[in-house]
Amino acid sequence: MTTTYRNLIGGEMVETSATMEVVNPANEEVIGIVPACGKDELDRAVAAARDAFSTWKKTPIDERRKVIQQISAAIKDNADELYRLLTSEQGKPHSQAKGEIYGAAGMVAAQSTLKLDDVINEDSDTRLSRTRRVPVGVVGGIVPWNFPVMMAMQKIAPAILSGCTIVMKPSPFTPLTTLRIAELIKDVVPAGVVNIITGEDTLGPLITEHPDIDKITFTGSTATGKKIMEGASADLKRITLELGGNDASIVLPDADVEKVAEQLFWSSFSNAGQVCIAAKRVYIHEDIYDDLSRAIADYAKNIVVGDGSQQGTGVGPIQNKKQYERVLELIQDAKDNGYKFLVGGEHSDPSGTGYYVPITILDNPPEDARIVAEEQFGPVMPLMKFSSEDEAVERANNSEYGLAGAVWTKDTDRGVALAERLETGTVWINEYMHLSPFAPFGGHKQSGFGAEYGEEGLKEFTYPQVITVKRDAKV
Ligand code: NAD
């Protein structure tokens, strides 16, 4: 069934004359028709956000918190409908889609509790100096297709908590669930505070360059992040960029092979590997390499790749055709170079229906293999052997990316010491992909600019303003 969706502009659900189709990656059927906005619709959304900003920035923060909590409740109350819709447009299995919807509702509620208190810099007989945070203004949000709801909500919540208003653009591949949420929150958010508009990739640069947008908060690829930085430079817009990653996991020889195999598998394969913080390179100590790689391969053989709406599916399709072809190309390159496959590597038929890639695990490919050096963003896991910690650290850090990483060991002190040598924004010891709404998440090197989450993330939507009163002035 194909449903027509509308955009949220200035508190109204609106249609546009130009539209675009959204496809279910599990069967390539068109499931949604959404507006294809251009400059005119963007101008209307920005004008609505600017209008709303003058009142919203003066609205007491506790009232802003309440609105955010109502958004969280709207998502939670409609979770059943939303997670099914999410699976149909994104491809992830129902259980993971449920995790994203409830996770987004929880994250929004948690972010609503963040504080933006004033800071006293000096309180002396001669002077009172105080820093307050003022909202930057109208924010443009741009998000990708791998976690469409979580990404949109993790930007909307802190933006409006800070007193900003926002124009959010979902990925053209996955706008449906976000537009459904737009309908659900239309009456709880004051008109113009949150606007959600859809369009092709060409809408992105119009947002970046819009003269009445003050800040861009972006999640997506490093290549697009660079274009945004360039576009935003014209009027020195503030920017936050959450970009690509090629995260390394390092497994030390004391790790229990049976216990970590399953966790390592999911650190690479949840959401079919389409996670910025997925383990994309796994370095295993040579003492346990054979046993652990066998245990991971054995576990993988029981996981079903298929339509995420069907019970029993562990790994869904790739979200879109372009990414599907890219992942197949990386696997083909590995085959052409004679690298060894522990699982997968068989011929997959690109003419079949749905963008399915078999689970693929490689046995010790070289460091310069494309499938190791590039961000795969698919159900691919290269396992590599190392012999010393120094070597593991050097190989893990040998990347233009610096998003996250993990260390697996019974000796957590040793794990922490190793983590501190990794050049990434987040390192987990004995877990993976845990993000806290209270801890800053951001990439080092070419994985990002600035941070989201926590007080640090919230401050990115504000300017500091210092007010100084001279107490012993002669006036
Ligand atoms: P993408 O960069 O192609 O697109 C992301 C968004 O940017 C989409 O909404 C797209 O329409 C828009 N866009 C495209 N061209 C634009 C331009 N020139 N100017 C402005 N906007 C433009 O990324 P994708 O393929 O949708 O997502 C996959 C990438 O996102 C991966 O590299 C992944 O690692 C990264 N990602 C990072 C994080 C993180 O938090 N660091 C999280 C999820 C995904």
Image: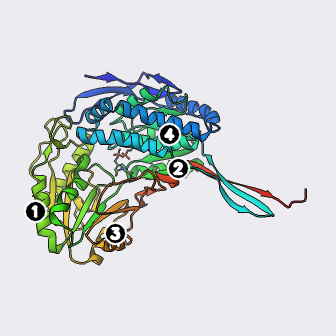
| Near-viewer residue (164 or 70) | 70
Task: Indicate the secondary structure of the residue bearing disc 2.
Answer: helix
Q: Crowding at label 4, few (<14), some or many (≥20) Cα neighbours within 10 Å?
A: many
Q: Which residue is mark 2?
A: 458
Q: Mark 1 to mark 3: distance in Å?
A: 26 Å
The total number of labels drawn is 4
| Near-viewer residue (264 or 376) | 264
Q: Which residue is mark 4?
A: 207
Residue 20: image tag: none
The quarter of the image holding the C terminus is bottom right
Residue 259: image x %, image y %? Answer: 18, 61
| Residues marked 1 and 4 touching at CB (< 8 Å) | no
Nearer the N terminus, badge 1 or badge 3?
A: 1
Q: Which residue is mark 3?
A: 397
| Near-viewer residue (232 or 46) | 46
Amino acid carrying mark 2 in the image:
Leu
Q: Mark 2 to mark 4: distance in Å?
A: 21 Å
> Who's the residue at 41% across and 24% down the image?
6
Amino acid carrying mark 4 in the image:
Ile
